[in-house]
Every structure is written in structure tokens, then in C-alpha cells.
Image (tube, grey):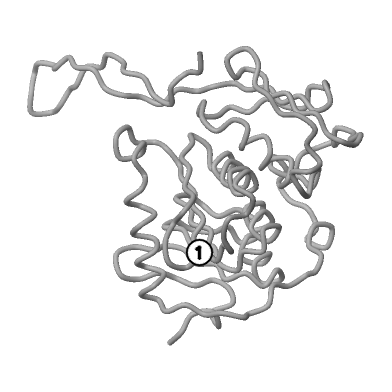
């Protein structure tokens, strides 16, 4: 049986104004360890929320450039209540010496080909704000429990795919995997994030051909530099009715 994304735990509430504590129960996030096996070889262990594990594995392999299409997957199954994700490829693949999702930096020229996304569409600032509001309204686990990260894919009008997980990178990998599993059902125009934007997230966004990244928090300096080179518009600190643009503002009207 698969574990739940949260469980209830006993807690004691204290405050400055009261000498007595109040005992209650509150939902808290669960951590799930899922070991990824590729062609029967152990590669790494995800620490994640126990949902969409197949999508997590697929998105990870896509982001690491191990696969470029679902046709390269011979079989994908969960074992031991999701503690093992077993992936068989149609080709041999050596385990990389390091994984990009855990590295602290690497050259842009080794990942991006072609090197720049074209500016072939624009959005009004109001549209960006409206789409991000839809994204926030769909964050049910974070609203109920708190502490969850989230990521969403938008077609420029709505947010058809959204995921929540305890980890930022897990969210992007799960989102990518679900998009592939659904056979790329629409053209994604925006990647929506709840947390900090790293350079690795910019790489993953470029791999899907998405021209805009939007978050309510900040990007790193390397993420900004990478976005400039990749041709991606980076939007951060979206709060209330305003936001900051860190790269390629030409995609915003006005």
C-alpha cells in the first residue's frame, strides 16, 4: 500500500500569553524514500512525497538527458509499495558519474542545443498575474498542511498540470513526467514554481521548450545568466499585483 503525502501527529501549542499548553493533532508532511533502478542497476534514491512516482522517474531521466521520448522506456513499475522504481530502457545506459539535479554548476554549452528559444509570442502582465493566481488556488496540499512545494504547466490560459511535493526539484521532474505520460497534450508557455528558481530548473524548462518561468520567490544569479543565454524570460517575486523580470523582458507587453 502506498503511503500518503501527509499524516496527523500529536502536537502541543504554546504561546506567550498562556501558561498552559493546548494539545491537538495536526497534519504533517511525510518523507518517502524511493530508489530508482535503471536496467536493474541502482542509480539513486529520491526523498520525496509518495505520489506520482512513475512521473518522477520519467521526468528525472528526461531532465538528465537519459531519454528523449517515452518510446525509449521498455517497462516502468513500482515495487515494495513504491520503495523501488524499476525502469527498463530499450537501450543500454551507463549510470552518470554525477547527476545534474544535484550538481552545483556546469557549462551551459553542454546542455543547450539549439542555444536560444525564439521570442514568438508575448503576454500581458495581467495575464501572468491571473495565471499564477490559478496556480496558487490549486495548491491544495500546501493549503491544508503547509510546507509543500509546487510546480505547474500553463498553456497561457489555464494550468492543466500541477503537482506538489516536499522537494522543489521533485516537483519539476514530476511535472515533466506527467506531461510526457499525457503525450504532450498542449503547448506549454509557462512553468510556474512556488520556490527558488535554480539554474537546473532553467535547463529543464529549456528541454521542454518553455519560454517563461514564473515564481513568487527569487532566482539565483546563475539561473538569471542561464536564462539570458537560453532565451527564457525569468519572472520572480510575484507578489500581489506586481512582479520582477530578470531576463528577456521583450516577452511582456507594455
- Give the residue drawn at x 34%, y 59%: 133
The secondary element bearing badge 1 is classed as: loop
* Residue 22 picture location, percent across and down: 14, 17
Residue at left 36%, top 44%? 139
Of residues 82 and 74, the one drawn nearer to the viewer in this rendering: 74
For this rendering, which residue is in front, 56 or 142?
A: 56
Density class for disc 1 (Cα within 10 Å; few <14, some 14-19, many ≥20) is some
Quadrant of the image containing the C terminus:
bottom left
How many numbered marks, from 0 up?
1
> What residue do we see at 45% from left, 42% from top?
149
Residue at image position (44%, 70%) is 244
Q: Where residue 228 sits: x, y (%)?
A: 66, 72
Q: Which residue is labeled 1 in the image?
A: 155
| Residue 99 in the figure: left or right of residue 185 | right
Question: Can you give x and y, in whole percent of width and height, for residue 170 in the image?
Answer: 58, 39
- Asked whether 251 or 196 is in front, the reply is 251
| Left or right: 143, with 68 as reference point | left
Tell me residue 105's x, y (percent): 73, 51
- Against 27, residue 161 (above or below) is below
Residue farthest toward the bottom in the current orientation of the protein: 254
Does residue 142 lie above or below 253 as drawn?
above
Q: Quadrant of residue 43?
A: top right
Would residue 63 be found to the left or right of residue 126 on screen? right
Amino acid at each position: 500500500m502506498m503511503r500518503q503525502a501527509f499524516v496527523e501527529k500529536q502536537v502541543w501549542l504554546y504561546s506567550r500569553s498562556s501558561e498552559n499548553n493546548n494539545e491537538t493533532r495536526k497534519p504533517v508532511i511525510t518523507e518517502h524514500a524511493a530508489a530508482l533502478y535503471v536496467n536493474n542497476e541502482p542509480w539513486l534514491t529520491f526523498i520525496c512525497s509518495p505520489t506520482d512516482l512513475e512521473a518522477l522517474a520519467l521526468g528525472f531521466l528526461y531532465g538528465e538527458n537519459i531519454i528523449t521520448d517515452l518510446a525509449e522506456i521498455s517497462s516502468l513499475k513500482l515495487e515494495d509499495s513504491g520503495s523501488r522504481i524499476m525502469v527498463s530502457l530499450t537501450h543500454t545506459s551507463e549510470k552518470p558519474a554525477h547527476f545534474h539535479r544535484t550538481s552545483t554548476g556546469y557549462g551551459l554549452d553542454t546542455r543547450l542545443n539549439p542555444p536560444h528559444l525564439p521570442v514568438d509570442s508575448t503576454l500581458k502582465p495581467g495575464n501572468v498575474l491571473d495565471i499564477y493566481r490559478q496556480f496558487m488556488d490549486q495548491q491544495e496540499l500546501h493549503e491544508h498542511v503547509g510546507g509543500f512545494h509546487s510546480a505547474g504547466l500553463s498553456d497561457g490560459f489555464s494550468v492543466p498540470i500541477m503537482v506538489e511535493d516536499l522537494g522543489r526539484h521533485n516537483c519539476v521532474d514530476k511535472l515533466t513526467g506527467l506531461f510526457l505520460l499525457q503525450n504532450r497534450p498542449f503547448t506549454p508557455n509557462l512553468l510556474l514554481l512556488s520556490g527558488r528558481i535554480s539554474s537546473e530548473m532553467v535547463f529543464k524548462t529549456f528541454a521542454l521548450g518553455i519560454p517563461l518561468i514564473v515564481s513568487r520567490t527569487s532566482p539565483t544569479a546563475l539561473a538569471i545568466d542561464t536564462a539570458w543565454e537560453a532565451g527564457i524570460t525569468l519572472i520572480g517575486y510575484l507578489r500581489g499585483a506586481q512582479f520582477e523580470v530578470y531576463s528577456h523582458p521583450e516577452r511582456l507587453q507594455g
